[in-house]
Amino acid sequence: MKKTLSLFLFIFILSKSYSQDFEFAKPSGSEFEMKKYEKDTSANAVVLREYGTAYISSQEGNLIFKHHVRIKIFNNKGYDQGNVVIPIHKNGDRFEKVYDIEAVTF
């Protein structure tokens, strides 16, 4: 358990030094106007930005994870790339909780 927690904390600290959150529902002009992904022109969709944070709440001691992703879908074959799966785990009689989901399409 301690090895897992140490690894998690190391990855979390490392990610904080290299990652940067971005504004919700405000695509840049270049992102909005993009018609294809230059590095793979046959791509049906591409993840433009992705950011996540995790922390332990001071009140309940729960692990809180926030995830923010921006996906550009180029055609109808890329629609499935906009699906987001949120796995829910159970520990004994306790289930994880999911709340405050927000989504926007353009």
Image (spheres, rainbow, N blue to C red):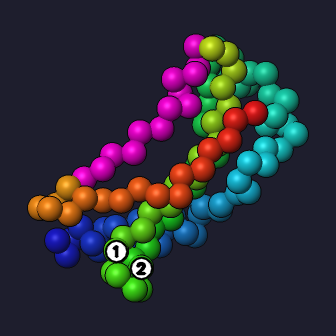
Q: Are marks 1 and 2 in contact (CB under 8 Å)?
A: yes
Separation of disc 1 and disc 2 at Cα?
A: 5 Å
Q: Quadrant of residue 18?
A: bottom right
- Report the amino acid beneath label 2: Ser
Give the labeled residue for mark 2: 57
The picture places residue 45, in percent across and down from the top left corner, at 62, 25
Q: Position of residue 54 (x, y in %)?
A: 45, 67
Determine which residue is flagged by label 1.
62
**Helix, strand or loop at disc 2?**
loop
The residue drawn where x is 34% and y is 74% is: 62
Let me know if residue 38 is in the magenta part. Answer: no
Q: Residue at x 62, y 30 (%)?
A: 46
Residue 74's x, y, as percent?
Answer: 69, 21
Of marks 1 and 2, which one's residue comes earlier in the chain? 2
Q: Residue at x 70, y 25 (%)?
A: 37
Q: Quadrant of the N terminus?
A: bottom left
Which quadrant would the C terminus be assigned to in this image?
top right
**Mark 2 surroundings within 10 Å by alpha-carbon count, few (fewer than 14), some (14 through 19), many (20 or more):** few
Q: Which residues are magenta?
A: 77-89
Q: Is residue 78 above or below residue 9?
A: above
**Could you tell me if residue 102 is visible in this image?**
yes
- Answer left or right for 66 relative to 57: right
Please, which residue is most extreme toward the bottom here? 59
**Nearer to me, 24 or 54:** 24
Q: Position of 99 compared to 46: left or right? A: left
The vertical placement of 63 against 73, above or below, is below
Q: Is residue 10 visible?
A: no
Q: Quadrant of residue 95?
A: bottom left
Q: Residues within 10 Å of mark 1 (few under 14, many from 20)?
A: few
